[in-house]
């Protein structure tokens, strides 16, 4: 069968409904327990046939994204090619809709999209477990970015336990208007705060209240259980975030928190109509909010250049559906 000339994948952002950060491990990483949720802010990645692996990025924050070998999508394509023994290249084109360095795993999302797109572009036959293993080598959030929907992450966050949920969560997202925050810098600030206060973290555990509220569709219960251990560190590095969080609370959000390592701020609403009202209040206060909802499926093939005239290939095919063929 003829290989596709290009493959286009849409991949969602993630948020951490709960991020519990434990002690530093021997390998330098922190032990974490997190509840991941994919939300409807997307990057689009297209991989097309080429002699080498390159990347181009467009979008409002494109200038903040590296175009060399440090780009996580490039690293993902190269690692996949190495493991699969592929000599072909790929031209990667990314349209950024996820905030850059905003605590929503935009780079990890692009890596997951590159794995899925290049896997199809190069007509490979790796199974889901093999791709997830490659994803884990690339970064702690990449396996969930490939998985999507809702899951508990343990270890560095790379070990996943899928969750079922009845809750539909509506968010107002306020990206930072300035530079992003470095995830390693935020973790380092978290460690410094703990040293200063003399607090020694225990190994983190899953939050049964949050998991139960998600399962039961209890949005106010989810709001009460939201927590992010990195938020104090993000606020220390960017004190202006405290004003943003206060503005969201004043606008009537059920809950407000920094997303992951920040600096994006998240506000949970009761439903879609309430989210619109919160967003309008934040806009009036001078912010530039966007709406998102979740959980949503993980990355999806939205166009397969092998069949450009076939309508069936112009509908979204989730990573789970595609990899289920293998």
Image (spheres, grey):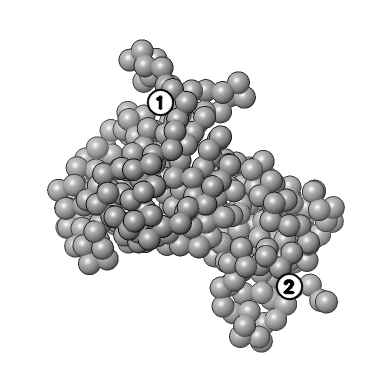
Assign the C terminus to one quadrant of the image.
bottom right
For the point 84% across and 56% down, the residue is 87
Q: CA distance from mark 2 to mark 1?
A: 46 Å
| Quadrant of res 51 | bottom right
Q: Is residue 84 left or right of residue 155?
A: right
| Quadrant of res 256 | top left
Q: Which residue is mark 1?
A: 190
| Vertical relation: 320 (above or below) 282 | below
Assign the N terminus to one quadrant of the image.
bottom right
Q: Which residue is mark 2?
A: 5
Q: Between residue 191 and residue 204, name the one nearer to us.
A: 204
- Report helix, strand or loop for mark 1: helix
Q: Is residue 118 left or right of residue 241?
A: right
Q: Position of residue 207 (x, y in %)?
A: 39, 39
Q: Can residue 238 be seen here?
A: yes
For the point 20% across and 58% down, the residue is 278
For the point 24% across and 59% down, the residue is 270
Q: Position of residue 61 (x, y in %)?
A: 45, 53
- The mark tally for this picture is 2
Q: Which mark is residue 222?
A: none
Q: Between residue 89 and residue 200, name the one nearer to us.
A: 200
For the point 72% across and 61% down, the residue is 119
* Label 2 Cα neighbours within 10 Å, binned few <14 / some 14-19 / many ≥20: some
| Quadrant of res 244 | top left
Q: Can residue 175 be seen here?
A: no
- Report helix, strand or loop for mark 2: loop
| Vertical relation: 125 (above or below) 158 | below
**Which of labels 2 and 1 is toward the front?**
1
| Vertical relation: 320 (above or below) 68 | below
* Label 1 Cα neighbours within 10 Å, binned few <14 / some 14-19 / many ≥20: some
Q: Position of residue 305 (x, y in %)?
A: 69, 76
| Disc nearer the start of the sequence (2/1) | 2
């Amino acid at each position: 069968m003829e290989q596709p000339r290009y493959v286009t994948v849409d991949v969602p952002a993630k948020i951490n409904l709960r991020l519990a950060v434990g002690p530093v491990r021997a390998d330098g990483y922190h032990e974490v327990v997190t509840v991941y949720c994919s939300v409807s802010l997307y990057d689009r990645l297209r991989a097309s046939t080429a002699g080498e692996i390159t990347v181009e990025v467009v979008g409002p924050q494109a200038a903040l994204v590296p175009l060399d070998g440090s780009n996580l999508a490039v690293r993902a394509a190269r690692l996949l090619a190495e493991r699969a023994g592929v000599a072909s290249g790929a031209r990667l084109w990314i349209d950024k809709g996820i905030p850059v360095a905003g605590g929503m795993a935009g780079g990890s999302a692009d890596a997951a999209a590159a794995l899925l797109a290049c896997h199809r572009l190069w007509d490979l036959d790796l199974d889901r477990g093999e791709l997830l293993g490659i994803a884990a080598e690339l970064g702690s959030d990449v396996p969930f970015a490939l998985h999507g929907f809702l899951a508990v992450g343990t270890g560095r966050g790379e070990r996943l336990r899928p969750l079922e949920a009845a809750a539909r969560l509506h968010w107002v997202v306020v990206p930072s208007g300035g530079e992003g925050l470095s995830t390693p810098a935020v973790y380092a600030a978290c460690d410094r705060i703990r040293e200063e206060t003399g607090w020694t973290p225990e190994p983190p555990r899953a939050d049964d209240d949050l998991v139960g509220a998600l399962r039961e569709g209890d949005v106010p219960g989810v709001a009460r259980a939201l927590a992010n251990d990195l938020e104090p560190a993000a606020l220390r590095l960017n004190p202006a975030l405290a004003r943003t969080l206060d503005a969201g609370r004043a606008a009537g959000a059920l809950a407000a928190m920094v997303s992951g390592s920040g600096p994006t701020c998240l506000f949970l609403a009761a439903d879609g109509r309430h989210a619109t009202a919160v967003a309008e209040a934040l806009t009036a206060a001078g912010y530039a909010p966007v709406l998102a909802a979740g959980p949503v499926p993980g990355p999806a093939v939205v166009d397969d250049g092998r069949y450009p005239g076939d309508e069936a290939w112009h509908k979204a095919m989730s990573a789970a559906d595609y990899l289920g063929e293998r």
